Image: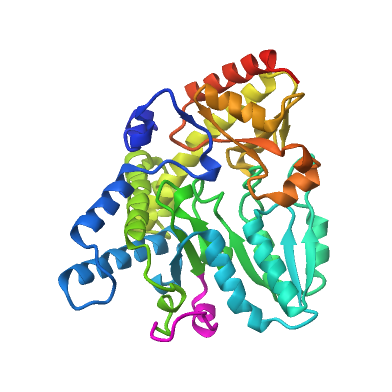
């Protein structure tokens, strides 16, 4: 069955207004109806704290367990106890880094990359400062936006204790060779922590295949509410000391989920994954043979859904590249070759000659086209590209509910703006 945009867009109430075009998706997608309905149902039918003896609490526990199992399928973890819910990726990363710090000694080395969101840099810099560790930086090529392989190998030669990697750049869209990089880091004896926030809306994730120790994303980047979802290898979640209150369980994942959880948000996470599985059922039949040998049930449908999404988003990628090429004075940062689209997600950073990024974002917003400007917390990227002091870049990010027609409207707006705005 063809990818039916009318059916897809009908699942997102925010898309009812055709005058609003959401290309701000890398900062947060619109929420799907499945997630909204799950959240509403939770608040009406089972709004109670966890682990009680009464019916609404038991129902609440069941919803949380179902959401954890769905996330297990999404990440392909070995067991549901390896899934930890939290406020967002940043909070979860800081939480884990604080506990990991007790395993680090002065002189131990940590590897971070200049291509990452600061949420996968600053926690490790703070750990290093607290424990007297050394930090090695992996650079990236400013023309292609891809990580410097030689820089990565040099860092591994110093036997780091932890390597922090991004699955995909939230600024330039680059997909890193995460499986190979994880293998090399593990061979060097390092723990591997992966930020998958920008990749998760666009492709299937398999932590067992990757072999990482931790991986985290945020559901509001994949059509759900503001909840972070962390995978941690069970042995580590079990053995690490968590910062928690004394009555809380000492067993994972509970010991990591400090305080009363955002249970309605967790219900929304379940709904978001049910939506992605629905995409697989509706539009992913041609991908069945690719995955059914290793997966079944929801895990299979999720992979079918992500494969269908990826195939459609390649069409959006090509349309966006055509638009960028049509605008005088526009510079695209990162990979721009049509034959390398499998190496990126549809997140693009641009600047237009003589137009400040904030002015361009404001002008697009006035035309109903929503985009981000600045550094989007990818501070090292904008510094390395030399644009931090001049406003950063404009970020345009598509997801599968966007249309080629919206891309064409973006092109018309950019060409109009470039002909009108003063320098």
Q: Taking 266 as reference, is 245 left or right? A: right
Residue for point 45% across, 63% down = 76
Task: Assign the C terminus to one quadrant of the image.
Answer: top right
Residue for point 21% across, 62% down = 46
Task: Assign the N terminus to one quadrant of the image.
Answer: top left
Residue for point 43% across, 60% down = 294
* Quadrant housing residue 134: bottom right
The magenta stretch spans residue 240: yes
Residues 366 and 409: in front is 366
Q: Is residue 141 visible?
A: no
Residues 144 and 108: in front is 108
For the image shown, how many numbered marks are present on the structure?
Answer: 0
Q: How is the image coloured?
A: rainbow
Q: Taking 111 as reference, is 243 left or right? A: left
Q: Which residues are magenta?
A: 232-248
Q: Is residue 107 visible?
A: yes
**x and y, in percent, of residue 207 in the image:** 52, 64
**x and y, in percent, of residue 366 in the image:** 53, 23
Examine the rendered structure and indicate whether residue 216 appears above or below residue 400. below
Residues 260 and 3: in front is 260
**x and y, in percent, of residue 274 in the image:** 33, 51
Q: Taking 242 as reference, is 34 left or right? A: left
Residues 41 and 201: in front is 41
**x and y, in percent, of residue 28 in the image:** 49, 45
Q: Taking 40 as reference, is 355 left or right? A: right
The magenta stretch spans residue 104: no
Residue sitting at the far left: 55
Residue for point 37% across, 45% down = 280
């Amino acid at each position: 069955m063809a990818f039916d945009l009318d059916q897809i867009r009908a699942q997102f109430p925010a898309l009812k207004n055709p005058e609003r075009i959401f290309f701000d998706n890398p900062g947060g997608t619109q929420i799907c109806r499945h997630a909204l309905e799950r959240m509403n149902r939770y608040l009406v039918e089972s709004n109670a704290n966890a682990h009680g003896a009464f019916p609404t609490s038991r129902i609440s526990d069941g919803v949380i367990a179902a959401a954890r199992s769905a996330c297990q399928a999404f990440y392909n973890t070995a067991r549901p106890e390896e899934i930890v819910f939290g406020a967002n990726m940043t909070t979860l990363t800081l939480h884990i880094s604080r506990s990991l710090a007790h395993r680090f000694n002065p002189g131990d080395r940590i590897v971070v990359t200049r291509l990452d969101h600061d949420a996968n840099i600053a926690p490790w810099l703070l750990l290093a400062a607290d424990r007297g560790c050394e930090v090695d930086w992996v650079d990236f090529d400013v023309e292609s936006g891809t990580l410097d392989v030689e820089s990565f190998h040099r860092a591994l030669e110093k036997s780091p204790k932890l390597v922090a990697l991004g699955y995909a750049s939230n600024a330039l869209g680059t997909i890193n060779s995460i499986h190979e990089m994880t293998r090399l880091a593990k061979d060097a004896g390092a723990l591997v922590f992966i930020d998958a926030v920008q990749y998760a809306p666009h492709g299937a994730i398999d932590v067992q295949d990757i072999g990482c120790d931790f991986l985290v994303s945020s559901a509001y980047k994949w059509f759900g509410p503001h909840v972070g979802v962390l995978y941690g290898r069970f042995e580590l979640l079990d053995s690490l000391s968590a910062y928690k209150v004394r009555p809380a369980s000492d067993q994972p994942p509970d010991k990591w989920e400090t305080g009363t959880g955002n249970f309605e948000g967790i219900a929304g996470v379940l709904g978001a994954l049910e939506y992605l599985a629905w995409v697989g059922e509706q539009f992913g039949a041609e991908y069945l043979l690719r995955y059914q040998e290793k997966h079944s049930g929801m895990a299979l449908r999720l992979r079918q859904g992500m494969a269908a999404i990826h195939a459609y988003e390649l069409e959006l990628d090509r349309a966006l590249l055509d638009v960028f090429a049509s605008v005088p004075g526009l510079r695209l940062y990162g990979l721009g070759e049509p034959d390398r689209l499998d190496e990126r997600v549809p997140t693009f950073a641009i600047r237009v000659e003589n137009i400040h990024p904030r002015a361009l974002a404001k002008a697009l917003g006035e035309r109903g086209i929503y985009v981000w400007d600045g550094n989007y917390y990818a501070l090292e990227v904008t510094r390395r590209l030399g644009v931090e002091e001049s406003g950063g870049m404009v970020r345009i990010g598509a997801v599968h509910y966007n249309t080629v027609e919206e891309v064409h409207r973006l092109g018309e707006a950019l060409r109009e703006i470039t002909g009108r705005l003063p320098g």
